[in-house]
Image (spheres, helix red, strand yellow):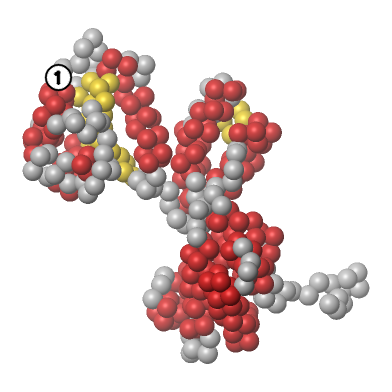
């Protein structure tokens, strides 16, 4: 392959991937790498670098960041080079700077590879993504340390690369690292996905739900009204299902206009809460909305935390049994 285009939602993850690619392509030969990422660099200079044979080595690595700053017509010479690239040149491009020319991306695909660094949204895919990154990392985390890292970083996976590099600098390349070694490097907990919060609320996990909402408001940097909108959409789906003649998740998905998996969760929770429980949740959401707009002289985070605690206590809990097997009365 002669070219790579690296894209993604998190600049830190894109930067980490470029660093990994350059290390893989050039090894320890810094003389083989030419970084042409300044705004003043014209496309003609990039093409000249790509046409230059390597000096005292087998390969020349040319890095160009934020190629979205170039218009398609400006990129024609580079697209032309990609049609017949110099075998000894490896070109690494990154997204950013504006809309990236699709013609450039298509040209890269013909002779190279598009790398998407975006973290998957699904829990299983996200865990698989993290496992792969940890396996490729400079240190070897045991299962408990890996799980702790994933839980702590949450949505803030852009910190993963620097954290692993710090562990390698402290304990050595290839070192086996456990929870005790990881803990001092964790720092502030990262943000979490909205469904982490709603799943905890649905499960009646008050402590977990409060922890998640605090991370969303803190490290996740979400405005309280944004969190409220997330909760409103969650209960609005249940409200639409309540009383509807829906038999399974497929019919629920058709009614809500979503995929079957979230529809099944909404349907199950709607049945657990019942009409009275859903009505109470909607009333609490309306009250919190007014409180966030000044109806109550509470800090915004307190309004949201009280709402989350209320909602998490709403679902009926299974009866606990004593030694004799009879349900304990509450």
Q: Quadrant of residue 276?
A: bottom right
Q: Going by the picture, which residue comes out furthest to the right?
A: 324
Q: What residue is at 65 percent from the left and 60 percent from the top?
A: 210
Q: Nearer the viewer, residue 24 or 312?
A: 312
Percent from the top left, x then y, of residue 167?
57, 28
Q: Quadrant of residue 85?
A: top left
Quarter that holds the C terminus? bottom right
Q: What residue is at 40 percent from the left and 40 percent from the top?
A: 13
Percent from the top left, x then y, of residue 305?
64, 64
Query: In this view of the protein, can residue 267 be seen by the observer?
Result: no
Judge whether 189 appears above or below 182 on screen. Answer: below
Left or right: where 32 falls relative to 302: left
Q: Going by the picture, which residue comes out furthest to the top?
A: 56
Q: What residue is at 38 percent from the left and 30 percent from the top?
A: 20
Left or right: where 51 falls relative to 317: left
Crowding near the residue tagged with mark 1, few <14, some 14–19, many ≥20 C-alpha atoms within 10 Å: few
Q: Nearer the viewer, residue 268 or 34?
A: 34
Left or right: where 204 falls relative to 251: right
Quarter that holds the N terminus? top left
Percent from the top left, x then y, of residue 94?
28, 38
Query: In this view of the protein, can residue 249 be seen by the observer?
Result: yes
- Disc 1 is placed on an element classified as loop
The residue that disc 1 covers is 52
Q: What residue is at 59 percent from the left and 43 percent from the top?
A: 188
Percent from the top left, x then y, of residue 74?
10, 39
């Amino acid at each position: 392959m002669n070219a790579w285009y690296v894209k993604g939602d998190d600049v830190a993850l894109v930067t980490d991937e470029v660093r990994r690619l350059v290390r893989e392509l050039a090894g320890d030969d810094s003389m083989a790498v030419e970084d042409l990422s300044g705004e003043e660099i014209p496309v003609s200079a990039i093409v000249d670098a790509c046409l230059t044979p390597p000096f005292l080595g087998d390969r020349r690595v040319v890095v160009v960041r934020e190629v979205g700053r170039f218009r398609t017509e400006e990129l024609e010479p580079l697209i032309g080079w990609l049609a017949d690239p110099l075998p000894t040149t490896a070109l690494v491009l990154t997204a950013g700077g504006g809309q990236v020319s699709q013609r450039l991306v298509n040209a890269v695909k013909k002779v190279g590879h598009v790398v998407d660094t975006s973290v998957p949204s699904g829990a299983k895919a996200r865990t698989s993504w993290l496992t792969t990154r940890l396996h490729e990392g400079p240190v070897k985390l045991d299962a408990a340390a890996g799980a702790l890292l994933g839980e702590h970083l949450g949505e803030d996976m852009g910190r993963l690369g620097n954290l692993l590099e710090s562990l390698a600098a402290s304990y050595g390349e290839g070192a086996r690292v456990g929870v005790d070694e990881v803990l001092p490097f964790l720092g502030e907990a990262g943000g979490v996905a909205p469904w982490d919060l709603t799943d905890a609320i649905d499960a009646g996990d008050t402590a977990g739900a409060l922890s998640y909402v605090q991370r969303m408001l803190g490290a996740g940097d979400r405005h309280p009204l944004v969190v409220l909108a997330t909760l409103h959409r969650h209960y609005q789906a249940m409200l639409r299902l309540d009383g509807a003649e829906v038999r399974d998740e497929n019919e629920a998905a058709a009614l809500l206009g979503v995929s079957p998996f979230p529809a099944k969760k909404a349907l199950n929770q709607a049945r657990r809460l019942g009409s009275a429980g859903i009505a109470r949740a909607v009333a609490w959401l309306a009250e919190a909305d007014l409180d966030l707009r000044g109806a109550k002289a509470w800090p915004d985070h307190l309004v949201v935390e009280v709402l989350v605690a209320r909602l998490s206590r709403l679902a009926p809990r299974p009866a606990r049994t004593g030694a004799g097997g009879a349900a304990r009365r509450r």
